[in-house]
Image: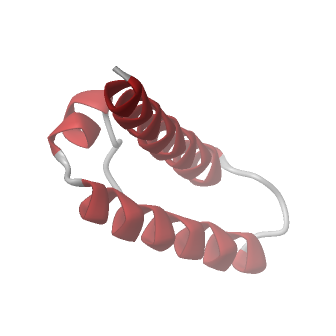
Amino acid sequence: MAVLRNSDIKKMSSQEKETKLRELKLELIKGSVQANKTNSKSKEIKRAVSRLLTSIKLNSLKKELKKTK
């Protein structure tokens, strides 16, 4: 799996972000079942998940601000 960068996340639509988030969470679960300890791949997946969640949260906050103006 390649590193998921912020520039790649910005190009994604909200639907793509949601599906990618589900895929990464599933991959993280599969990896934790196979290996009993954390490795570099699981750390990379956790970082990608946090980037996606942050991006989703920021987009929702921006939409809320636009509605209030």
Quadrant in the picture for residue 32: bottom right
Image coords of residue 57 (percent x, y): 50, 39
From what the image shows, is residue 16 above or below residue 22?
above
The structure residue drawn at horizontal position 46% and vertical position 62%, both measured from the top left corner, is 21
* 32 relative to 46 in the view: left or right: right
Q: In which quarter of the image is the N terminus?
A: bottom left
* 6 relative to 43 in the view: left or right: left
The total number of labels drawn is 0
Q: Quadrant of the C terminus?
A: top left
Quadrant in the picture for residue 60: top left
The structure residue drawn at horizontal position 44% and vertical position 44%, both measured from the top left corner, is 56
Image coords of residue 65 (percent x, y): 41, 25
The structure residue drawn at horizontal position 53% and vertical position 49%, both measured from the top left corner, is 49
From what the image shows, is residue 40 above or below residue 58?
below
* 28 relative to 12 in the view: left or right: right
Image coords of residue 59 (percent x, y): 37, 36
Residue 26 vs residue 69, the one in the foreground:
69
Residue 26 vs residue 22, the one in the foreground:
22
From what the image shows, is residue 19 above or below residue 59?
below
Residue farthest to the right, as pictured: 36
Residue farthest to the top, as pictured: 69
The structure residue drawn at horizontal position 83% and vertical position 58%, both measured from the top left corner, is 37
